[in-house]
Structures are given as C-alpha cells and as structure tokens.
Image: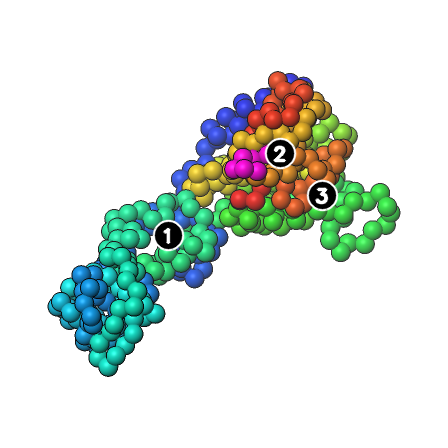
Amino acid sequence: MKYLSYETSQSMLDLAHVGSVRFESISLSKSLGRFLAEDIVAKYSDPQFPTASMDGYAILHADLEKDSIKILGVNPAGSNETRVLSAGECIKTFTGSKMPQGSDTLIPVENVTVQEDTIIINKKVPKGFSVRPIAEGYKAGDILIKKGTKIGFAELGVMAALNRVMLKVAVRPRVAVLSTGSEILDLGEPSSNLAQIRSSNNYTLAALFESCGAEVIQLGVVGDDKISITKIFENALSCADIVVSTGGVSVGDYDFVKDIVPRLGAELIFKGVAIKPGKHVMLAQKSGKFILALPGFAYSSTVTAILYVLPLLAKMLGHEKPYTVIAAKLSEDFKKRSTLTEFTACNVVVEDGEYFVNFQGKKVGSSAILTNLLGESALMVSGEEDNYLVKDTLVSVILLDRF
C-alpha cells in the first residue's frame, strides 16, 4: 500500500470543502469558550475624557509651586463634573472620575496635607500624573477582538465594558464520536476476562473536541459487526457534521470500518498517510459531512485527531489556526524510529527566552501509551528525511495547551 506524505494529506485536508461559517446570536453571559463570528469594534474611545487613575486632588500642575491650593469640593466617580478650575484651585477627585476642566494633574492624597479648605503640597509629582488620557485604552473604530477569536475571560470582560449584551458566534460543529472493537468495554461495563480493554478513546476525543469548540455526540462502543457498525455510522451521519471513529482501519480480519465507509456512499479523500503514529488514518466526505476513521490505539487516535479533526473544526468555527506550532531546540540527541513523519510526545521548557525540547519521563514503545501526553506535553515533529537529530537541532513542536 502506498501512503501519502504528511504534507500532501494536509494539503488535501485544507482543500476539503467545509462551507461558510454558520452563526447564531447568544448573550454575553453564555459566550465563554465560543468563537466570535464578528469583529468587536469600539464605538467610543476609552476613556472618552481624561480620567483619574487614583484618589487625589485634581490640580493645574503649575500650582504645585504655590504655598497652598484651595479645595472647591469633591468629585465622586460617576458624577458629571462640570466645574472649571482656575489657578490656585483644586477638587478632590476619586479613582475613575472625570478630571475637571482646567486641571492637568492628579496629586495623590498621601502627597498633601489638608488644612481647613486648602491643601499643602508635601511631595510634587510630574505633569499629567495619574491622569488617563483620552483613548489610552483604545480609540473609537478600533477592532478590539477579531472574528474567529475564542472567547476567554479577557475577551468577555472587554465586551462587557463595551455593553455588548448579545454577540454573534459560530455555531458549534456537531462531532459524533464512537469506538469500535469487540474487545472494548465502555465505562461501568463488567469485564469477563483480562484480555478486554476499557474504552478511553471516545472520552479522550470527546474532551479534546469540546475544548476546541465542538458539540460532541457520544455514541460509545460498537463491536466488530458489520451491520452494527454500518447502522451506527448512518445514525451518526444523520445528526453530526463530523463523524470520528477509532479502530477498524488497519489490515486485520476484523477491521471493518475501512470497507464500510465507502459503502455508505462517502467519497474517499485519502486513506493511509506516511506518519507515525496513525498511518492507517482515513478521511472521507458525504453530503458535506466528514468521516474521520482513526486507529484504535489511544496515543495514535489522539495524535491523528489533533492533526486531522482539529483543522476541520477550526474551519467550521472561522478560527485561524487549529493549534500553535513553535520552533524549539533539542536539549538532547534524538533517534527516529521510522522513515515516516513522526509525532513524538515531549516536554517544552523556556530557557533565556528560547524554547527547548526534552523527553524526560516519556516512555518509548507502542502508540498505545496515552500517559505520554499527561502534564504539559507537546508533540515534536520530525520529517521523513530526518534520521538522527543532534542536540541543539531546531525542530517544530505542536503545543497542546492552547486549544
């Protein structure tokens, strides 16, 4: 069997037609973790007028040379201050308050002594001290948050400050997840012998896809039976945008998925990629919906889901990048185990502003070792042409903490 190169498979995935991003309007309070389907533009500058950034007295800076300055009154936050200061006058002004006209500096309360209705300056400050200028934060018309951004706490806070009650967000793609194999037991299902394997793939992938903005339909486990597998795929295609299965794509007698998918009327985009792990990965499409058939081993299915499912999700959500790739230096020599493009679990550390890769605590073995992805792990990419990479070689690394 001839395998596609990893680069070719990614190009074919990129060319796959996903359609335009669907959107819906939701309230700000429900938007955490969703992806914006519109640019967030500032209607007004922030602040719209000079504003005090601490408690003190609004003054004219030149008055710091005077023996005393007369207090006209107080200016609480939120009040529409209209008084105009003249030379020798000040107003007690609080954090967030509009600076009175005629003032250009705020002197902190701890820098003065109050004597009846005047202040005595004990410690001078520079001109403009503790005054937020107009548009310090942003100007009217600025794009503050771009379309396709995943909404986090900072984005939510900025939009609240803009009084955005409702937002346009991408509709969450629906991803159906299922595991195949008669040896697989779902959670809580009693085991009859030690050769049976507890299902983890469907839960791992469901968590991965949800963290990336999808709505997951958990279909559980189906045994190695052609009729049952066909039926569950048909059901999945009726309700999901992407169907992701694990197991049944290799060359074994019970690997039925690879044969069933084409019989469903799906158009095969590719089958078999020169990667380790996951070379038997298969991508097909039917009526605008995608089928990703992934290998059964836990590490293998997770890595291939990152490489092939997340890009589709990103497209459907209008998100620019499915994951972050960085350049890092090897902290130790690395020997490739195959002539394929490899994705190796690693650790990434930052030293003196540079990224470095090491493999401490990572076990070498089959593609079943999901524990290699625990902690702050990442995936180091080594190409088909790579063989023995010496320490300090620059490599590409997929970060797994920024989905």
Dot 1 alpha-carbon crowd within 10 angstroms: few under 14, some 14 to 19, many 20 or more: many
Q: Amino acid at mark 3?
A: Thr
The answer to which of 334 and 127 lies nearer the viewer is: 127
Q: Position of residue 50 (x, y in %)?
A: 23, 60
Q: Residue beneath label 3, please?
A: 371
Q: Residue beneath label 2, please?
A: 357
Mark number for residue 168? Answer: 1
The answer to which of 302 and 214 lies nearer the viewer is: 302
Please state which of the two labelled residues, at mark 1 or mark 2, is closer to the viewer.
2
> How many marks do you count on the picture?
3
Where does the magenta region start and end?
A: 351-357
Contact, CB < 8 Å: mark 3 with mark 2? no
Q: Residue at x 65, y 22 (%)?
A: 389
Q: Residue at x 57, y 26 (%)?
A: 394
Residue at disc 2, secondary structure: strand
Contact, CB < 8 Å: mark 3 with mark 1? no
The answer to which of 346 and 124 lies nearer the viewer is: 124
Q: Amino acid at mark 2?
A: Val
Whether residue 323 is situated above or below residue 48 in the rendered picture: above
Contact, CB < 8 Å: mark 1 with mark 2? no
Disc 1 to disc 2, C-alpha distance: 40 Å
Q: Position of residue 46 (x, y in %)?
A: 28, 56
